[in-house]
Image (cartoon, rainbow, N blue to C red):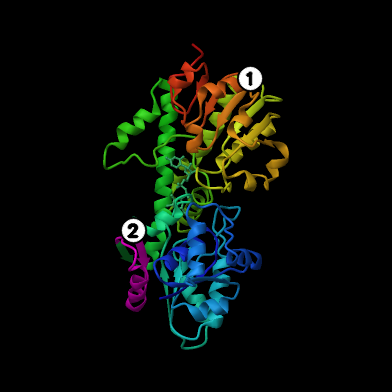
């Protein structure tokens, strides 16, 4: 089947590569000529496990190609996926100008029936606007259908999430379009949920905000644990063993970040307000998330008294492990606050260094080549991202290189008892038992 993806960012590129991998002929369109050039040369602009080899393999087998021409894309694909950015505006609502522009461009080149699929995360009722726009700008009488097909991939496991999804949601009002979508997804073994367009669009925002709610819920519990001496990890295990609740997304820490949750929660709040049904619960989710980082900085300040000129090692800059993405990373916000107070920050991240070095904060901190180098001579170690290699650190070697053995573990990666046994003073999140130097 011939498929076109318009927008070769995180979602578009991974979706295109996976559709090619299952045998479809995919053209990915992007208006960034330099990006298209490097993709043709097999260079992937993001770190995503398994993606580079998938792209190379499918480019070589001529099932995947890249172009800057929307016209070529519209002519090629029976199905046209829109996967362009939907960035936030200052009031939290979504900027839909890229979607609107692509809808006009598609309309301009539309000559025969196409299924136009919205894959970008959009507010409910966007499909209706895309339909109106295409109808307005297309040649009279040309046939098309608009479908919503939200994406649920996570950065760091995007290829796996796409190849083996929990579910595929297809929202549409036309049997013709739904049949074509079912065919496109036939090679993927996953339950397909067919809905109307508005429900499909809502599913995406409702899913992301529910996951953020779970994180803020356990983070709120972590505060109660700190006040009582209980251990949030044990509480999360205890409630997570209830199948109705589940253990995933119950890891307390510095809170959620990234290019999706903060933006989507703000958007969902804005949408609900525009609809006249304010979703106030989500405002509390946001404020708990902000409080986690504020409380953590207060904890560091309380222990170190003055942050100015303190040599602090920070492990982790990406918004989560297995990605180089530092957009809306809590680790970056944390480093910004520490630098603002005059701390001498030496940071390390296994994959996120290059992208962090392009941020304004780069001029105010220093970067190390390894985790241990960052910790050498440090008066405290701060763990900001849950990379597995940080969890596997040799605590004896770490203690030997640090000036003072103090760990602030913002992701509960280190075992507090082991840390205490190696002579560390340890502070985690929601772990009431404070490990002190024996
Ligand atoms: C999220 C969703 O999980 C995907 O299903 C969705 O497709 C994607 O957004 C999107 O809308 O495109 P992603 O942003 O890649 O995926 O990352 P997550 O794995 O969901 O993590 C988000 C944040 O929550 C990270 O900062 C992570 O550290 C934090 N988190 C996650 C916690 O603090 N605790 C947890 O228990 C889990």
Q: Position of residue 19 (x, y in %)?
A: 43, 67
Label 2: state its secondary structure: loop
- Numbered label attached to residue 180: none
Q: Which mark is residue 403?
A: 1
Q: Are marks 2 and 1 in contact (CB under 8 Å)?
A: no
Q: Residue 95's quadrant in the figure?
A: bottom right
Give the residue displayed 57% in from the left and 62% down from the top. 42
C-alpha distance separating marks 2 and 1:
50 Å
143 sits to left or right of 175: right
Q: Is residue 145 left or right of residue 103?
A: left
Location of residue 410 with respect to 397 vertically, above or below: below
Mark 2 or mark 1: whose residue is earlier in sequence: 2
Q: Residue furthest bottom?
A: 141
Q: Which residue is depicted at the point 52% across and 16% down?
A: 423
**What segment carries the magenta color?**
168-191
The answer to whether residue 122 is seen in the rendering is: no
Asked whether 181 falls inside the magenta stretch, the response is yes
The single residue placed furthest to the right in the displayed view is: 363
As helix, strand or loop, the secondary structure at mark 1 comes to: loop
Residue 154 appearing in the image: yes
Label 1: how many residues lie within 10 Å, few (<14), some (14-19) or many (20+)? some
Residue assigned mark 2: 167
- Based on the picture, tell me whether residue 384 belongs to the magenta stretch: no
Residue displayed at 47% across by 77% down: 77
């Amino acid at each position: 089947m011939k498929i076109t993806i318009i927008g070769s960012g995180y979602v578009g590129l991974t979706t295109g590569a996976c559709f090619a991998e299952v045998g479809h002929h995919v053209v990915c369109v992007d208006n960034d000529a330099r990006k298209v050039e490097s993709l043709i040369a097999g260079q992937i602009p993001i770190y995503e496990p398994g993606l580079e080899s998938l792209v190379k393999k499918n480019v070589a087998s001529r099932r995947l190609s890249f172009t800057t021409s929307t016209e070529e894309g519209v002519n090629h694909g029976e199905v046209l996926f829109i996967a362009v950015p939907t960035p936030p505006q200052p009031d939290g609502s979504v900027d839909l100008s890229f979607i609107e522009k692509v809808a006009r461009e598609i309309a301009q080149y539309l000559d025969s029936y196409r299924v136009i699929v919205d894959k970008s995360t959009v507010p409910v009722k966007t499909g209706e606007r895309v339909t109106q726009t295409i109808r307005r700008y297309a040649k009279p009488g040309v046939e098309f259908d608009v479908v919503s097909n939200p994406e649920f991939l996570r950065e760091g496991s995007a290829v796996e999430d796409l190849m083996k999804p929990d579910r595929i949601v297809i929202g549409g009002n036309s049997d013709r379009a739904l049949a074509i979508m079912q065919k496109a997804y036939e090679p993927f073994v996953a339950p397909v949920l067919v809905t109307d367009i508005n429900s499909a669009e809502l599913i995406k925002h409702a899913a992301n905000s529910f996951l953020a709610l779970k994180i803020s819920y356990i983070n709120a519990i972590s505060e109660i644990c700190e006040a009582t001496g209980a251990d949030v990890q044990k509480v999360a295990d205890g409630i997570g063993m209830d199948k109705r609740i589940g253990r995933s997304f119950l890891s307390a820490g510095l809170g959620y970040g990234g290019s999706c949750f903060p933006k989507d929660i703000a958007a969902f709040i804005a949408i609900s307000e525009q609809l006249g049904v304010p979703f106030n619960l989500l405002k509390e989710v946001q404020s708990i998330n902000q409080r986690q980082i504020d409380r953590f900085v207060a904890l560091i300040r309380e222990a170190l008294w003055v942050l100015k000129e303190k040599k602090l090692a920070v492990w982790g800059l990406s918004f989560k492990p297995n990605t180089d993405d530092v957009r809306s990373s809590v680790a970056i916000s944390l480093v910004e606050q520490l630098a603002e107070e005059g701390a001498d920050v030496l940071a390390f991240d296994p994959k996120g260094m290059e992208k962090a070095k392009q941020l304004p904060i780069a001029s105010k901190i220093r970067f190390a080549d390894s985790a241990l180098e960052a910790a050498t001579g440090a008066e405290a170690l701060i763990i900001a991202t849950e990379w597995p290699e940080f969890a596997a650190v040799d605590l004896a070697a770490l203690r030997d290189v640090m000036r003072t053995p103090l760990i602030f573990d913002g992701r509960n990666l280190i075992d507090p008892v082991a840390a205490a046994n190696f002579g560390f003073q340890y502070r985690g999140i929601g772990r009431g038992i404070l490990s002190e130097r024996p």
